[in-house]
Each structure stands twice: as structure tokens, then as C-alpha cells.
Image: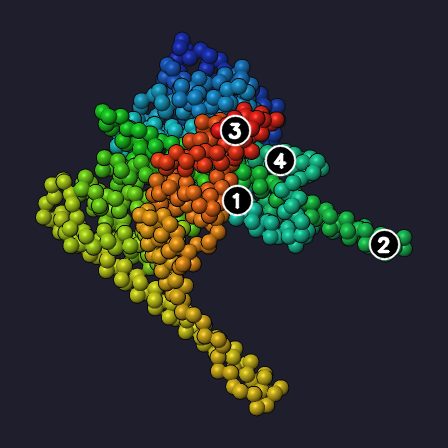
């Protein structure tokens, strides 16, 4: 009866939950669980008898987790016990009783042998045993329940427990555990027979990702604000935090121990701004108390007459140092928390990208298609809701440009409609969120995927329709359509005219001049042509809107300059009478003049490349006459290397000519290579990538002699090179 009156305490709740599970257990099959559960109940009962106040104040249930773990026996599951135990664990996390920060003993909680795929991904960690916390044991147990027990109620309870743990303010799920939590819900979505469970699992997955990425963005903003505040105390504070000395490292260790202690008590900043404000408020109160105590000591010294002016200055200096050091420690603590959040977000982002890149078997497995579609859907959600940290951090931007773009290229050309329909919106999301960082990648995807779909006769109606819809949405944004023209069509370094290609392909589709080997109904063809025509209309509308914005800006600039000119004239009139009136500043060139010049240079460069591919010396002469190239060997050599549209055979012919200037270009061309550390055949293949050797033996001889000289120069014999002289390499 005494325990029934303490159900609102941690001990009372654990006692009651174990009693409920014991009623559902079997005396013969669940001996180990019953023994541990009864021992825990006796321990709780004695604690309430000995000191009720301390027992009621105890909020840490980590030490009582073992019986609940044993009740989740996935090898020989008792469904009722399992469901009740998961429900109790979920409630303990929600009430803040389970923090999971306790480092566990592997004898009491032996490591779970997860599947081979997980062991493969953790191959590096297998050499050095990972320190396991109770939260890791908790998530591993729930993961095994989700993958081995096929029961609708258990699956729902698993989902509830995991989302409660991920969102908890006291139970910190990070690193390996956050991946397992996502995998559990992912597995339930793929294997659940109940449609309601599938829908719930997908929604919870989206919610988990939002929580993880929102935490990262929040701590990123908090760290930025803290650095701005700390700059008031000490200008070089940021440098201190980047390269801390030994004392700073010790302070960091102390602060991290304090942070862990606070997390156990449930006071660490995890998600909400309210919690962060409380932590910052507590630190500020401590600083104020230190300042107040220092001021009191200074006043006492003045009252006694023993305080002097130098000592007062030293006290103020020490006080300022204490404030700066405390602010730096706070900044380091926030930076450490941000690093943990970034690691969690990166692990999830990488795992989803890898799932989206998995090849679907030729037998077209429905589960594989379902898995890839879900990964693309979750990635789309992350990209659409991306914050400043995800859009600007080099780690994420580099991964997106390398791996996610590769996944996008692979899925956009998939033969499965469900897959390429999910990949297309992701491209639009990348354009909207990562346009400044992905100029090259956007051009590659547009030119090689969507424009190629419209031009290829092998594309189906669905693929052509998707490509037209993508272009239609791009053309609706004036900023995007103008940037496409300026960044690709007006840039000499760009290989493709994306804007021009878009207009040409849309015009062909609108006129019905596209080719398609697939059968297409008149209704589908009419729909395709109407969408293309609408896209061209939006291009014109976007350009008109952009011109209106430019005119408005130009009018504002002109009005401001006229006003400044009048003020200048008024000041000059008071100093010198009879001076001629200045009506305005020097006329500025039109805004579009520089881009028209770039466009003209781009067209002349392409004309010069065409002439070079027919007759190299005529092409080089044309480019020099139009000031597109200098008559300099280094400049021409760089041009031959950088432009991929140049014919490689003609490059070889030009470099092999027996003329002084051509020889200089050849020497500069080869001297720009660095063959250090390369094998001889590897260096030769690397050199020959840019051109084709001419057919004449004397030309080849001159080129090979210079190559041999450059190779021996980069790989001297006394430093491990294979050839003593260039003659040996030749």
C-alpha cells in the first residue's frame, strides 16, 4: 500500500511497471527477468522505508533499466510483456527518468550482434571497442524488437518510444544510436503489413530528421550570437577558441564535465530556445555574482584606506579577464554541442544518400523501389527545409556536390516512373536552396539530363513531360532565368549555352518538331506542346519583370546622383562664383553593356574554336586579332589546355609544328604538367589525355624529347627517380 501512494515518483512508477510486467511473465520461461525484477522491487521498497524523502527526490532510473531490457526478449518474445515494457520505457523517457548517460558494463549489458551490414559500416570501430552508454543499449534493444517481432501493436510502440527518445530533453540520442533509431522506423515502413503503421513510420521519420537538423541550425545560430557577444569582451576571443592552449583545454574538459552533469539533471540545452536562455541566464548570473564580489572587495579596500589606485586597476583587469574566460568557456561548450549536432545530421544525410544510390535489381524488387523512393522523399524534405548551416557549411556542401548530385543524375534517368518523379523535385529544391554553390552542377544536370530528354527520341512521354515541367518551373522565376543566361551563355569559361539550349528545345516541342520513337496519343502531344509554349511565355514575362526592376533601380540611382550633384554644386558655388554648373556625374555605361560584351566575346571565342578545328594557325590568329588571346606562348598553352571543344588532333598538329613560336607553346604546354611521384607510363597517359600525337615522326620526336626532360626534372634520380638523364627516359 505504501508504494501505491508514491506512483508520482520515479521509484513508485518503476515498482508499479515491474509489477504489471511480472503478472504477464511466465515463471518457467522468464526466470532471469523475474529474479532481477523482484530484486529491483525490493531495492526500491527498502529505499522508501529507509528515507522516503530521498527516495521520492530520486529521478534517475538508469540503475533500474536491466529488468525492462530483459522483458524485451526478441529471441523468444512474449508480446504482452514486450508491449508493456516498451510502454514503460517510453513513459520513463517522457517523464525524464531515463537520461541514458550512464556508461554501462558490457558484462551486464552484452553488446548486441547486429546484422552484417551494420558490422560492415562499423568496421573501423570494431578495432577499438566503443564506449557504450545506456542510451545505446536502449536504442539497440528497441531496434532488435523492430526487426525481429512482427506485431502491429509492438511496431507502433517502437515508433512512439523512438520519437520520444529523439525529442527528449534529458535522453540524448546521438551518433550510432540516432542511425539505429532511423533504421528501425525505416524497417517498419518497408515491412509493416498495416497501412496505418507504414504511414506513421514515414511521418515519424520526417519528424526525426526535422528535429536533428533543427537542433543543428539552432546551435549554429546560438554560437554565432555568442561570438558576437564575446567580441565585446575580447577582440581575439575567436582565435582563442579555435586554437586553445593547455589551460583552455583543461577548462574545456571541466566545462564538458559540467555539461554532462547538467544533461543528467535535464538542464542542458538540447532543442528549445527556452532551455538555452535558462543556461545562458545561469552563466550570466554567475558572472554578475563574480563581478559583485570583486566590487565589494574593492570597496572594502577603499574604506580601510589600504586600497591604492594600482591595485584597483589590477582588480578591474582581473575582473575583465574572468569575464572573458567565462565567456570563452561558454562559447566552447556551445561549439562542442554544435559539433555533436553536425555529426548527427551528417550521418543521417549520408545514410539517406547512400540508400538513394542503391541499384535496383533487374527483377525490380518492390521493397527496393519503396526504399529508394522513401530515401528520396526524406532527402527532398531536408533540402526544402534547409537552414543556413546546411546551405553554407563546407562539409555538407561538398557532400551534396559530390554524392547527392551523383544520386540525382542516376535517379533522373531511371526507367521507373516513381523514382524519376521523386528526383525531379529534388533538382528544383537544389536550385532554390544551393544556387550560389552549385553553378557547375546545375548546368551539368540541365544540359545532360533534362535537355537531353527533350532532344532524345528514346525518351518516353512521361520523361519528356517531366523535363518540360522542370523547365516551366525554372522559367517562372525571373532571377533564375537571368542567372542562367549570365552564368552560362555570357561566360567565356562555360562550355554550354544553357539558356539558348532551353529556348531551342522548348521551341521545338511547342512546334511539335520533337522526335519520339515511343507511341504518343494526340492528347499527350497537345499537353506537351502547351506546357512548352507556356514555359516560353514565362521566359518573356520573367525578362520583362527583370527589366522593370532594372529600370526602377536605375531611376533610383540617377535620382540619388542628381541629389548629390546638387548638393556638391551648392557647396562649390559658395567657394567659387562664376564656375560652370555641373548637371550630373559622368554618364555610366548601360547595365547590360558589360554582359553584351561578354556575350560577344563568347561568340567570337566559339568562332575561333571552329576555325582552329579546321586550321589551327587561322584559329589562333583570329583569336589574337580580336584580343581574345595574347601573342604569348603561355597564354596560348593555357587556352589549348582549358577548352574541351578544341579538336585534340589539331592541338597535336599545332604543338608539333617546326616553328619557333610553336615550339615555345609546346614547351610551356608541357612545363605546366607536374609528373612528381608518377610512374612513367602513368605520366605518359596523363600527358596524352589533352591531345593526339601527330602522324609525322619528327613532330613526335620533338614532343617526346620535351616530355622526357619534364619527367626527369619532376622525378630526379637522387630523390627516387628511375632515370638518371632525360636521354634515358627518351
> Which element type, helix, strand or loop, lies under badge 4?
helix
Disc 3 from disc 1: Cα separation? 62 Å
Residue 644, given in percent of the width and then of the height, sits at 37, 44
Corner quadrant of residue 309 = bottom right
Q: Is residue 6 visible?
A: no
> Which element type, helix, strand or loop, lies under badge 2?
helix
Disc 2 from disc 3: Cα separation? 78 Å
Cβ atoms under marks 3 and 4 closer than 8 Å: no
Q: Which residue is mark 1?
A: 219
Cβ atoms under marks 1 and 2 closer than 8 Å: no
Q: Badge 3, how many Cα within 10 Å: few under 14, some, many 20+? A: few
Q: Pick the residue in front: 240 or 377.
A: 240
**Among the two numbered marks 1 and 2 on one chain, the one whose residue lies closer to the N terminus:** 1
Q: Badge 4, how many Cα within 10 Å: few under 14, some, many 20+? A: some
**Among the two numbered marks 3 and 4 on one chain, the one whose residue lies closer to the N terminus:** 4
Disc 3 from disc 4: Cα separation? 64 Å
Cβ atoms under marks 3 and 1 closer than 8 Å: no
Residue 256, numbered label: 4
Q: What residue is drawn where x is 64% and y is 50%?
A: 230
Q: Is residue 670 visible?
A: yes
Residue 670, given in percent of the width and then of the height, sits at 48, 39
Q: Pick the residue in front: 310 or 85.
A: 310
Q: Which residue is mark 2?
A: 310
Amino acid at each position: 500500500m505504501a508504494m501505491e501512494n508514491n506512483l508520482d515518483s520515479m521509484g513508485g512508477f518503476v515498482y508499479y511497471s515491474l509489477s504489471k510486467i511480472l503478472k504477464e511473465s511466465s515463471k518457467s520461461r522468464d526466470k532471469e527477468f523475474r529474479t532481477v525484477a523482484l530484486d529491483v522491487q525490493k531495492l526500491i521498497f527498502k529505499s522508501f522505508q529507509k528515507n522516503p524523502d530521498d527516495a521520492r527526490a530520486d529521478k534517475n532510473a538508469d540503475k533500474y533499466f536491466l529488468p525492462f531490457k530483459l522483458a524485451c526478449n526478441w529471441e523468444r518474445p512474449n508480446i504482452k510483456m514486450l508491449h508493456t515494457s516498451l510502454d514503460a520505457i517510453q513513459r520513463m523517457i517522457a517523464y525524464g527518468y531515463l537520461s541514458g548517460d550512464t556508461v554501462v558494463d558490457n558484462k551486464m549489458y552484452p553488446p548486441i550482434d547486429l546484422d552484417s551490414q551494420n558490422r560492415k559500416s562499423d568496421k573501423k570501430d570494431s578495432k577499438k571497442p566503443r564506449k557504450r552508454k545506456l542510451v545505446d543499449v536502449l536504442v539497440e534493444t528497441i531496434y532488435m524488437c523492430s526487426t525481429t517481432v512482427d506485431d502491429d501493436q509492438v511496431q507502433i510502440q517502437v515508433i512512439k518510444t523512438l520519437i520520444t527518445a529523439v525529442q527528449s530533453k534529458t535522453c540524448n540520442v546521438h551518433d550510432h544510436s540516432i542511425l539505429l533509431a532511423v533504421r528501425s522506423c525505416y524497417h517498419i515502413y518497408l515491412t509493416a503489413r498495416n497501412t496505418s503503421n507504414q504511414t506513421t513510420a514515414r511521418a515519424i521519420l520526417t519528424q526525426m530528421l526535422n528535429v536533428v537538423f533543427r537542433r543543428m541550425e539552432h546551435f549554429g545560430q546560438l554560437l554565432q550570437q555568442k561570438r558576437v557577444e564575446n567580441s565585446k569582451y575580447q577582440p581575439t576571443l575567436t582565435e582563442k577558441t579555435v586554437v586553445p592552449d593547455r589551460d583552455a583545454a583543461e577548462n574545456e574538459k571541466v566545462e564538458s564535465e559540467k555539461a554532462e552533469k547538467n544533461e543528467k539533471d535535464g538542464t542542458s540545452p538540447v532543442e528549445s530556445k527556452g532551455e538555452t536562455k535558462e543556461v545562458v541566464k545561469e552563466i550570466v548570473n554567475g558572472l554578475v555574482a563574480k563581478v559583485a564580489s570583486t566590487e565589494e572587495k574593492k570597496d572594502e579596500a577603499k574604506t580601510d584606506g589600504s586600497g591604492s589606485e594600482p591595485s584597483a586597476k589590477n582588480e578591474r583587469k582581473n575582473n575583465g579577464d574572468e569575464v572573458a574566460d567565462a565567456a570563452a568557456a561558454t562559447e566552447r561548450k556551445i561549439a562542442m554541442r554544435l559539433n555533436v549536432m553536425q555529426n548527427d545530421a551528417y550521418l543521417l544525410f549520408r545514410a539517406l544518400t547512400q540508400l538513394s544510390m542503391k541499384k535496383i535489381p533487374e527483377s525490380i524488387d518492390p521493397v527496393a523501389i519503396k526504399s529508394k523512393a522513401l530515401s528520396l522523399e526524406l532527402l527532398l524534405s531536408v533540402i526544402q527545409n534547409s537552414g543556413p548551416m546546411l546551405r553554407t557549411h563546407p562539409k555538407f556542401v561538398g557532400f551534396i556536390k559530390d554524392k547527392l548530385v551523383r544520386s540525382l543524375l542516376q535517379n533522373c534517368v531511371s526507367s521507373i516512373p516513381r523514382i524519376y518523379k521523386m528526383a525531379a523535385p529534388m533538382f528544383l529544391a537544389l536550385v532554390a536552396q544551393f544556387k550560389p554553390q552549385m553553378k557547375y552542377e546545375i548546368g551539368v544536370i540541365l544540359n545532360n539530363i533534362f535537355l537531353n530528354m527533350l532532344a532524345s527520341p528514346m525518351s518516353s512521354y512521361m520523361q519528356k513531360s517531366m523535363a518540360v515541367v522542370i523547365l516551366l518551373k525554372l522559367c517562372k522565376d525571373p532571377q533564375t532565368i537571368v542567372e542562367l543566361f549570365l552564368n552560362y551563355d555570357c561566360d567565356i569559361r562555360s562550355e554550354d549555352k544553357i539558356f539558348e539550349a532551353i529556348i531551342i528545345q522548348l521551341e521545338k516541342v511547342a512546334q511539335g518538331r520533337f522526335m519520339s520513337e515511343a507511341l504518343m496519343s494526340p492528347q499527350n502531344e497537345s499537353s506537351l506542346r502547351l506546357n512548352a509554349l507556356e514555359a516560353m511565355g514565362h521566359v518573356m514575362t520573367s525578362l520583362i519583370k527583370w527589366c522593370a526592376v532594372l529600370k526602377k533601380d536605375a531611376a533610383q540611382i540617377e535620382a540619388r546622383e542628381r541629389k548629390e550633384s546638387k548638393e556638391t554644386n551648392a557647396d562649390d558655388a559658395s567657394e567659387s562664383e562664376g564656375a560652370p554648373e555641373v548637371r550630373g556625374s559622368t554618364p555610366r555605361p548601360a547595365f547590360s553593356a558589360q554582359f553584351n560584351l561578354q556575350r560577344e566575346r563568347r561568340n567570337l571565342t566559339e568562332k575561333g574554336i571552329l576555325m582552329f578545328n579546321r586550321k589551327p594557325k587561322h584559329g589562333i590568329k583570329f583569336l589574337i586579332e580580336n584580343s581574345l588571346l595574347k601573342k604569348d606562348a603561355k597564354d596560348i598553352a593555357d587556352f589549348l589546355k582549358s577548352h574541351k571543344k578544341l579538336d585534340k588532333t589539331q592541338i597535336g598538329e599545332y604543338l608539333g609544328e617546326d616553328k619557333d613560336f610553336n615550339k615555345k607553346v609546346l614547351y610551356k604546354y608541357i612545363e605546366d604538367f607536374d609528373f612528381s611521384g608518377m610512374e612513367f607510363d602513368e605520366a605518359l597517359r596523363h600527358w596524352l589525355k589533352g591531345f593526339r600525337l601527330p602522324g609525322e615522326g619528327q613532330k613526335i620526336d620533338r614532343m617526346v624529347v620535351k616530355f622526357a626532360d619534364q619527367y626527369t626534372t619532376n622525378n630526379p634520380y637522387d630523390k627516387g627517380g628511375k632515370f638518371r638523364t632525360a636521354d634515358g627516359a627518351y
